[in-house]
Amino acid sequence: MSLEQKFEALKEGTEYKFFINGKWKKTRSGKTIPIKNPYNDEFVASIQACTREEVDESVVSARESITCWVETPLNQRVDILRKSAELIRESAEPLGAILMKEIGKPIKSAISEVVRTADIFDGTADFASIMGGETIMGDAFEGFTREIISMSYRVPLGVVLCIGPFNYPFNLTGSKIAPALVAGNTVIMKPPTQGALTPLHFGIILEEAGVPPGVFNIITGRGSEMGDYLVGHPGIDMISFTGSSTTGRNLAKVAGMKPLLLELGGKDAAIVLDDADIETTVKEIISGAFSFSGQRCTAVKRVLPMSGIADKLIKRVVEETQKLTIGDPAENNTIGPLIDSKQCDYVQGLIDDALEKGALLKCGNKREGRVIWPTILDNVTTEMRIAWEEPFGPVLPFIRIQNAEEAIKISNESEYGLQGMIFTENIDLAFNIAQELDVGTIQINGKSSRGPDHFPFLGAKSSGLGTQGLKYSIEAMSRPKAIVLNLSKRGKLIRECGVYR
């Protein structure tokens, strides 16, 4: 049976099932949630609205499987990740087609997201060697001798809850699953409601790759209805979440003392100094601001140009923005639908507020259905909501600055601290500015970005908690355990004055 044929096992007609202890099930409540294409509102499929009792069953399944998975040798877990990567690559086109329909991502980008997830599984397998431990002698500290030896190794945390976002539902869920499994944890995956269909296929892929029943489980449903119950469940040992800062703060409150790895919102600012290379800067800003219609935590969300370059920069950004294709994601248009009408209303509200307060519209401010045309706003001030709030849509404000100090001040006053950008030919000055920015990562002469995936990825303030990236995620999903050996002095060779005794 081909992998595509096996994919049919996870659904009945257009009704997808959930996955517990190696079995695909329909909820006993009989309730389902319809998933529609955000571009044309066509019905795609439905998912199960799981109950709290079914959440309990998934936790029991995961907890009962901990011992068998922990005792699976690391090399076998690594082999399973590599096999999973092969299967993901084989399925890139059919999975990409589903992803395009359920979240409105351009088909080329959707397929690329699936392939990149395979790379993450392979990369995580490469970094699994950090699961090895270390041996330390005690004589580095006064009063201790070499007879005291610490031997440490890494152990899993237990049951890891992986909650992915709608904008990269396959990739950013897979980037949690792979390190959790290789570290020896069992996993419960809660995909986003809009964006659940593609990650549901992990159930078939991981089973085919050799993950035993119960080690990997999937629960579906609306976070508003069962999210708090799942997050606060005493059987969950660690949570890895990607989503909004508002949801992340609530999650942290409900989770209590559980270890957390949170990837939240951003308001990434591009500081453009007068000596910046104009064409490089324009290219990076356009790509960073409007890929997937700006629905990215690392999107360029505001530009802070100095007065000597502002007019020329804005003119070129507008010219290139007006060349972007708009419409059906199946035709690979850059600008497609936002995820739902509520988000469109929010983005439109930010644009309207800015225009009412004196911002200058350079292009855009047009809406058809859930598609908002890429919008450029000039003369934005710090009194406008768009200067501070994360739009998660195709709108880019320009806040003109007089000097680097002003740019640093505006950037750091944000509640967010994901990434920052500095465009300049003066690398010494760029490094000086970078050290002043209160963000997780600073890009010099490049757009804000999550990758490469072996780089550390983190946020300050309301943008996140903990560090992701291949080896960093493995470390976050495991902990060191030390055994201290206190050796007897008897039988030890002691040399005094050249004589052994």
Image (spheres, grey):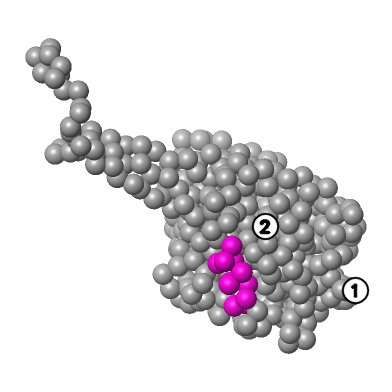
Residue at 54% x, 74% y is 231
Q: Amino acid at mark 2?
A: Pro
Secondary structure predominantly adopted by residues drawn in magenta: helix
Q: Which mark is residue 212?
A: 2
Give the position of the N terminus as an image quadrant: bottom right
Residue at 69% x, 80% y is 50
Q: Which mark is residue 13?
A: 1
Which secondary structure lies at badge 2? Answer: loop
Residue 21 percent across, percent down from the top left: 68, 67
Q: Nearer the viewer, residue 205 or 456?
A: 205
In which image quadrant can residue 200 be found? Answer: bottom right
Residue 255 percent across, percent down from the top left: 48, 73
| 296 is higher (above) or lower (below) than 229 | above
Magenta highlight on residue 424? no
Residue 45 percent across, percent down from the top left: 85, 74
Asked if residue 407 lies left or right of residue 448, the reply is: left
Q: Which mark is nearer the camera, 1 or 2? A: 2
Kindly tell me whether residue 472 is visible in this rendering: yes
**What's drawn in magenta, residue-wise?**
55-65
Q: Amino acid at mark 1?
A: Gly
